[in-house]
Image (spheres, helix red, strand yellow):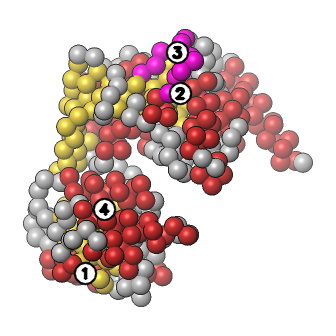
């Protein structure tokens, strides 16, 4: 068919172009979550010193990668940063056939695409392909806190492997603190320590930054240079985005709806040291059979987080969250249920005062204005 022909043609062009750029360093990132954030962090750190080309947004398919190589990669570029997605076994191989990495990066092995893979071990097998396919005497940067990822370097003694993490690793982050300006944490590598300040929030973002630090360090950047670049990075809109409104700190996480992200957001809110803590949420939708169970778990997380006020949007679909909250012994008089975001905002404004922190978790589709 014509489509396959076009596909082959673009793939051939991309491979030819790469073969004419022997000095180009190809960095490839895979993982269940955090690929796109990590890619942009790597791009931003390395741009301090190198000419970097990277795939936009979550371009992570063969055609997406070929398009960037064919259209955006220029002779002046020294580094190409790619994100490699995998829904099925064999996907990563196909991507590495186009662009074999000099440096491979793996964020984590989660449950994304579990339905097509069948098991987390199968997901890990596919993701580990990126390390297996890394060029001889290349480099790998791996999340040491995820045991499936940490095991991926086994059998590649030729690679220079950097492990990063909170618990263990060659490069570590500790002492994460949150405030109205964002978060700060200390990065240590060998004997060196450096304070990082970011406008981003969430321990997962600190983890993504550690992976980027691992890559940048392996390419000769200094921690002080990286910290400067990190402080300038802007959050993705509506993804744990920090805003300030009449003296109130607002965490806008409206674009998230997955259970992992929701848990991260509640943990982030709970970790703020100033003011009272308020969450406004309709819960999670579009989760099929597991929706009720996941919302109940979300309720338990909310109940255990030590928050001061919970505002639930929508009487019907927040029943499961309410049950979860109640099961933790949380003071139910501090849980309000309203029928629209407009009412939620009104309730929040009546309650909140200077210095308080409000989390908007998950967008509110029209169907929720009951």
| Residue drawn at x 32%, y 57% as measured from the top left | 265
- When asked about the image quadrant of residue 282, the answer is bottom left
The answer to whether residue 260 shows anywhere in this view is yes
Q: Marks 3 and 1: in contact by CB < 8 Å?
A: no
* Mark 1, residue position: 336
- Residue span colored magenta: 151-162
Q: Whole-percent x and y of residue 343? A: 28, 84
Label 3 secondary element: loop
Q: Reply above or below: 355 against 150.
A: below
In the image, residue 48 sits, relative to residue 298, either above or below, namely above
Q: Earlier in the sequence, mark 2 or mark 3?
A: 2
Q: Residue at x 19, y 48 (%)?
A: 178
Residues under labels 3 and 4: Cα distance?
A: 40 Å
Q: Secondary structure at mark 2?
A: helix
Q: CA distance from mark 1 to mark 2?
A: 47 Å
Q: Can residue 238 be seen at all in this image of the molecule?
A: no
Structural distance between the alpha carbons of marks 4 and 2: 32 Å
Residue on which disc 2 sits: 152
| Label 4, residues with CA under 10 Å away: few <14, some 14-19, many ≥20 | some
Label 3 Cα crowd, 10 Å radius (few <14 / some 14-19 / many 20+)? many
Q: Residue at x 35, y 25 (%)?
A: 169
The reply to whether discs 1 and 2 touch (Cβ–Cβ < 8 Å) is: no
Q: Earlier in the sequence, mark 1 or mark 2?
A: 2
Q: CA distance from mark 4 to mark 1?
A: 17 Å
Residue, disc 3: 159
Q: Which circle, 1 or 2, is nearer the viewer?
A: 2
Residue 364, quarter of the rendered image: bottom left
């Amino acid at each position: 068919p014509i489509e396959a022909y076009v596909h082959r043609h673009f793939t051939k062009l991309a491979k030819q172009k790469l073969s004419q750029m022997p000095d180009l360093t190809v960095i490839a990132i895979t993982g269940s979550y955090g690929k796109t954030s990590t890619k942009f962090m790597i791009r931003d750190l390395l741009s301090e010193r190198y000419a970097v080309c990277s795939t936009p947004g979550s371009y992570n398919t063969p055609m997406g990668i070929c398009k960037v190589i064919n259209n955006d990669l220029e002779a002046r570029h020294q580094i190409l940063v790619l994100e490699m997605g995998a829904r099925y076994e064999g996907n990563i191989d196909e991507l590495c056939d186009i662009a074999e990495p000099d440096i491979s990066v793996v964020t984590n092995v989660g449950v994304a695409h579990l339905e097509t893979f069948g098991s987390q071990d199968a997901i890990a097998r596919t993701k580990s392909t990126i390390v297996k396919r890394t060029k001889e005497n290349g480099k790998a940067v791996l999340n040491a806190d995820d045991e499936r990822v940490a095991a991926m370097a086994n059998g590649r003694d030729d690679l220079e492997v950097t492990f990063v993490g909170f618990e263990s690793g060659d490069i570590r982050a500790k002492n994460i603190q949150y405030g109205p300006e964002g978060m700060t944490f200390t990065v240590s590598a060998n004997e060196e320590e450096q304070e990082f300040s970011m406008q981003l929030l969430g321990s997962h973002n600190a983890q993504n930054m550690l992976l980027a630090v691992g890559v940048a360090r392996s390419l000769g950047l200094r921690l002080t240079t990286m910290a400067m670049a990190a402080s300038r990075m802007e959050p993705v809109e509506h993804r744990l985005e920090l805003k300030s409104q009449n003296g109130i700190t607002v965490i806008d996480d409206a674009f998230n709806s997955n259970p992992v992200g929701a848990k991260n957001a509640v943990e982030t809110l709970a970790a703020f040291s100033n003011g009272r803590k308020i969450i406004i949420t309709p819960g999670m939708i579009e989760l099929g059979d597991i929706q009720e169970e996941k919302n109940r778990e979300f309720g338990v997380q909310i109940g255990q987080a030590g928050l001061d006020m919970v505002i639930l949007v929508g009487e019907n679909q927040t029943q499961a969250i309410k049950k979860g909250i109640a099961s933790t012994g949380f003071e139910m008089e501090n849980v309000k249920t309203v029928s629209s975001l407009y009412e939620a905002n009104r309730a929040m404004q009546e309650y909140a005062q200077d210095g308080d922190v409000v989390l908007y978790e998950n967008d509110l589709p029209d169907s929720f204005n009951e």
